Amino acid sequence: MKLVIAIIHERDKHKVSDALLQAGHKFTNIATTGGFLRDGNCTLLIGAEDDKVDEIISILDKCCHTREQFVSQTPIDTLASGGMVVSPVKVMVGGAIIFVVNVERYERV
């Protein structure tokens, strides 16, 4: 048994959730926040048999897309004393970060 931990952008949450449920996968959805842009994320905890992991990753790949976003200023708390705000910077957001870990024991009570 495996635990798939997927960190996705909140804009992809509904599409991913619908696709996973339609394919018969159960999961837990945890609202999280990204560290760099402090943007809304969603962390999914998905328990799966070993032979279902590739199917889950395929669903995530189809539903999670990267997109360009402009960051107009550096977060205030990261500026040094007397620091200047820089011009907007283009960054890529979205996609999915996926961890697959072995599960030693699983019980549903």
Image (cartoon, rainbow, N blue to C red):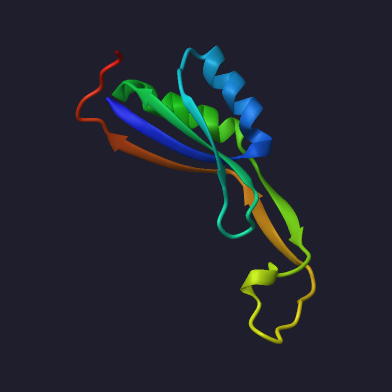
Task: Specify the quadrant that holds the N terminus.
Answer: top left
Residue 92 sits in quarter: bottom right
Q: Residue furthest left?
A: 104
Q: Is residue 102 above or below residue 24?
A: below
Task: Specify the quadrant that holds the C terminus.
Answer: top left
Q: Toward the viewer: 56 or 75?
A: 75
Residue at (37% x, 22% y) in the render: 52
Residue 12 sits in quarter: top right
The x and y percentages for residue 26 are 45, 18
Q: Is residue 37 left or right of residue 1?
A: right
Q: Is residue 86 left or right of residue 41?
A: right
Q: Is residue 70 above or below residue 108?
A: below
The x and y percentages for residue 89 are 74, 67
The x and y percentages for residue 15 are 65, 26
Residue at (59% x, 27% y) in the render: 16
Residue at (35% x, 22% y) in the render: 48
Q: Is residue 54 left or right of residue 101?
A: right
Q: Toward the viewer: 45 or 59?
A: 45
Q: Toward the viewer: 62 or 48?
A: 48
Number of numbered tags placed on the structure image: 0
Residue at (38% x, 27% y) in the render: 53
Q: Residue furthest bottom?
A: 82
Q: Toward the viewer: 92 or 29?
A: 29
